[in-house]
Each structure stands twice: as C-alpha cells, then as structure tokens.
Amino acid sequence: MSAQGPDFNDLFEQLRREVHGKNEKSSSSGPSFVEQIAAWSRRALIIAAVVLVVVLAACYWWFHPSLNLQSPQVCVWIVGICLVGILVLAVAAARSIAKAPVFKRLMLVPGAVIVAIAVGWLLSQPFIPGNAERYASVLTTTDGDFATDIEQVDYADVPVIDRDSAVLLGNRAMGSIPEYVSQFEIADTYSQINYQGRPVRVSPLAYADFFKWLSNRDTGIPAYVIVDMVTQEAEVVRLEEPIMYSDSEPFARNVDRHVQLSYPDLMFDQKSFELDEEGHPWWVYPVQRRTIGLFGGTDIYGVVLVDACTGETDFYAVEEVPTWVDRAYPADLLIEQYNWSGAYQGGWLNSWLGQEGVVRTTSGTNGELGYNYIAQGEDIYLYTGVSSVTADNSNVGFILVNQRTGDSRYYALERGGATEDSAMASAEGQVQHLGYQATYPLLLNVAGQPTYFMSLKDAAGLVKMYAMINVEQYQSVATGSTVEECQEDYLTMLAADGLLSDDAAADASSQREVTGVVATIAQAVIEGNSHFYVTLEDDSAGTIYDFTLPEMVEIVAYQPGDEISFRCGEKIEGLVTVTVSELI
C-alpha cells in the first residue's frame, strides 16, 4: 500500500470505536424503570404503597373473588400480586446497595409461588398419569331402564313452552302492571323449577337502571314473575316482604357480593332463583370443590341458600339440601362431567387416538350445549342425548341426571336414535308450508317408548302446534294443534308400527270410525288456530266434531249434505276432536 493511500486498519479501528461508543451511550441513555422508582422520595414511596393497598382492597370488595387457592380467579390475582412484590423488592434492592443481595434472594419467594401455581395447573391436566381415570369417575353414571325409571307421561303436566316463549309471556304479564313497568324490568333469570307440583319458570323483577335503583332501593323489589309452562299463564306475584338482595343491586346488597363476602373461602357455581312451596323467593348457590390437582375435576359438595328478602344465609351439604330445591348441580357442569367420563373412560391416549367407546353429549343449535329438563316427582332432571364422537348423526343413548342429588342414569338405544337436531328438522319439515320453528325436544315416556316432544312456534314466538317423534323410529312425525291431538295421532302411529304393548295398542285402537252426512259446518279461530265444527245428520246425541287446521285442511271442501268419514277419540263434554284425517 502506498504511503499516500488510506490506512484501512486505522479506519476500521476508528469505526469500531465509534460504534462501541454509541452502544455504551445508548445503554446508559437513561435509568431503568426500577431505577426511576428507586429515585422517588421515601414519602412518595409510602403514598404509592398506601394507594396500592387501597386499590387492591377496593378491587377485592368490588370483584369479591373467592379466597381459595383452587379458584383460578384468585390465583390470577396472586400471580399479579407476586409480580408487584418482585417489583417492590427490585426497587428496594436499587435503593440499598448494602442490602441488595438480601432483597434479590427474597425475590425467589414470589417467584416460587408463581411456579407452584403453574405446577398445580399442570397436575390438573388429564394427560398426567392417573388423572384421566379420575376425571372419568367424577360423575358416577349407572344404567337404567327407561320404561321403569321414567313415569308415564301425564299430559296435564307436560311443559309446552321453552324459555324464549316464557320470556315473551312474562313481558306481556309485566305490561299489564304499568306502575311496575316504569320502574322495573324482568331479570333475565327464568329458572325452571317444580313449584307445587307444576313445571314453571320464575324470575324476579330488577331495577330498570341506576336511577330507578336510587328511587326504589329503600322499598326493594316488590314482585317476581311466574310462568306456567303447561297452561302458558304468566303472573306477576306481588310480595308482602320485598326482595332486597338481587343481582340488580349495584353495591352492598348485590346478592353475589353478599354471599361471597359472607363465605369468603367458598367457590360458588352458577346461581338460580327458586321458590319454596309457600312461594317465598330464594337464591340457590351451589358450592364447588376441585378433586384433581389445583383446578381440575370440579364437583358440587354443598349449597348456600340466600333469603332474597332478608339476606339470611344457610349452608347445606348436598345430601341435606331441602327437597324444594331443584338445582344443586348446574346443567353446564353436569354435561361437562359426563363428557369427562365419556372421553376418558378408556384413558387419555384413547380419547385422542383410538377413541374406542368415546362418547359425548349432543350439541344444540349453533354449537351450544343441547339439553332440556324433565319433571319427575319433586325433582328436575337434566336430559341430553349421547352420541359417538366418530358418528354424530345419531344418538346411542341419553342420560337423565337429578339436579338436586346428582344421581345420573344412562339409557342405551338398541338401534340408535335421532339426534335432537334431526328430530327438530323432521318436525319443521312436517309443517314447512307454515314456516314454524321447533323448540328443543323434551323427552317423554309415551306407552313405554322414549319420545321427543316439541312445540312448533310461529315467527312471533307463539306456540301453534305440537309434534311427537319416536326416538328410535324417527321416520314418522305426529303433529296436532293440541297436545291431546298430537298424542292420539302418535299412539295411532306407534300401533301401526307395532311398537305398542297389547294394553297400549288397545287404548290407541279405541278410536272409533265415524261415517255420516254433514248437517252443519261452522268456522272459528281459537288462540290463532282455525277450527271447523261439524255436526252430522241423524245424530240424536248432537255431537260436535272439531277439525283443526292445517292438519284437517281437507274439511274446507265440505258442505252440508256431503258424506264424510273420519276417525276420532272419545267425546268430552259433547265435543270430539278429530285426530286422523281419513276424509272421503
């Protein structure tokens, strides 16, 4: 290299120094976050600590998490507090050089707590050896005999409306009491219970908004709404002693806050609003426990009852819960527990690979949980179908679980059966010209046969017709404008398919065939349904035959003097309902 040329070694060394100098400058451009806090005065640090404690106390009062290490919510809080603790120790170490090693060692304590929570979560997972079997045994399910265990249906007690229809009826009843409408609305609770031997849905009133609460908080909530699911009658029940504890209360009398602060270490599941046999309102809080690891295997071991009027509370072990209580076990939890047993009965690996014998509960519309309720005696039973994970187009059986005791029974279907969605589609297809929508099926015992029962609703949500489908023989659909018509049509269909016992077949075949000449024919509309009332010539008894539309639409072509033939049931107070359309 010439003497006049550049010395590249010097240039490289100069460049290296410049870069290194910039890095040193950037690394020391300013103090870290911890160093900034450490530079605060002692007074500022004390104020910050007091504010932090006050904020944490206010958050605890407002959010009221359970003070239980098995609560995921409180563990999230603990992790947050541990991170704050690590920050505090880091600030202390930065302020005191002499004691810095001590503070740094103390950081291991909150770090160890975070690690312990992570380990507890890991030990809750089903892939840990032995956990799959434990998950499978959380809910003990025994085999049952449907015809024996489930009482024959009494059509006087069959619920004919679902929750959505109950909400509509409740709102109508509320509209009839203008002094309440201006201040209150109906809470979105609508718990289904057995009340005085009747299936009903109940929901308390709630303050319409914050300002309505300010105006009425001293006098409380004056009533609740009860909807009879059989008669479709809705009533606003006025209370002598008002409801003072509800979830529409924002502060001290908020029922969730009240019960959690009364039992700070208990973990509560989804509450329900219920009535005792005297019509007094209560809040029912199931109490959870974890049976696997730190967070796994949720089960119910007790119930806290809260008097909605006085706020008084009582804890009951689950086996000691009063018989009027219908929901000690929430529906979502029962379905989750059964799905554990269905998935892990052959082990965790089998639930993913071989999937031999793996089953699950059926889903409802839009992928939601699919279930309904059956009233038996004093109890409410959860019903849901069971299908194989490898073939979800049919049910292999169904389960019934007592929501008060947790007793679970499985009923196998020898030939498989229709899923609830398939049954709903079949029922809707039967009346597709009317555009009716089917409710989620209710499971009934009709002549010893498991039967889907559905209401068919119009676009306004009003029940117009009913449908019955045999769970195993689901090709045929029986419909009717009344429950009785639907039942008679269904029994006739079962008899034709040879599915009835001799006694039941005899009952079904008791329908009689009538032939005659039309004497008079008149039309009327009852509850939105068209009826044609027919009398026959030479009928000394003066019987009136009721033809309902749309099932008996052929009747519109008949006039007085035309010959007619049809099948019908027995006479009830001079009126006979025609159930089988065999007009000639």
Image: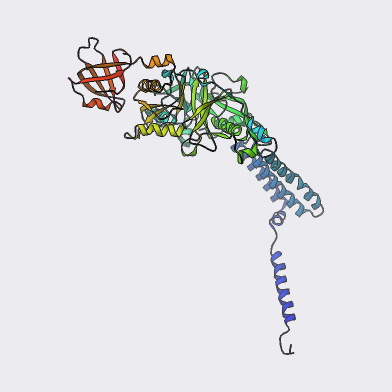
- Residue 431 appears at what percent x and percent y? 34, 32
User: As drawn, is 526 to the left or to the right of 166?
Assistant: left
Which part of the image, by quadrant, shows the N terminus? bottom right
Q: Which of the two residues, 20 or 443, is positioned nearer the viewer here?
A: 443
Q: Which of the two residues, 451 or 439, is positioned nearer the viewer here?
A: 451
Count of picture labels: 0
Q: Which of the two residues, 431 or 67, is positioned nearer the viewer here?
A: 431
Compared to 92, does 172 lie above or below?
above
- Residue 447 appears at what percent x and percent y? 44, 18
User: As drawn, is 324 to the left or to the right of 478?
Assistant: right
User: As drawn, is 414 to the left or to the right of 435?
Assistant: right
Q: Which residue of the protein is positioned furthest toward the right in this rendering?
A: 98
Compared to 138, does 513 lie above or below?
above
Quarter occupied by residue 117: top right
Which part of the image, by quadrant, shows the C terminus? top left
Q: Please indicate, yes or no, whether residue 219 appears anywhere in the rendered image.
A: no
Q: Which residue of the protein is positioned furthest toward the front in this rendering?
A: 498
Residue at position x 78%, y 50% in the image? 104
- Residue 443 appears at what percent x and percent y? 47, 25
Q: Please indicate, yes or no, whether residue 143 appears anywhere in the rendered image.
A: yes
Quarter occupied by residue 76: top right
- Residue 207 appears at what percent x and percent y? 47, 32
Q: Which residue of the protein is positioned furthest toward the left in this rendering?
A: 561
Quarter occupied by residue 231: top left
Q: Which of the two residues, 351 or 190, is positioned nearer the viewer here?
A: 351
Q: How is the image coloured?
A: rainbow
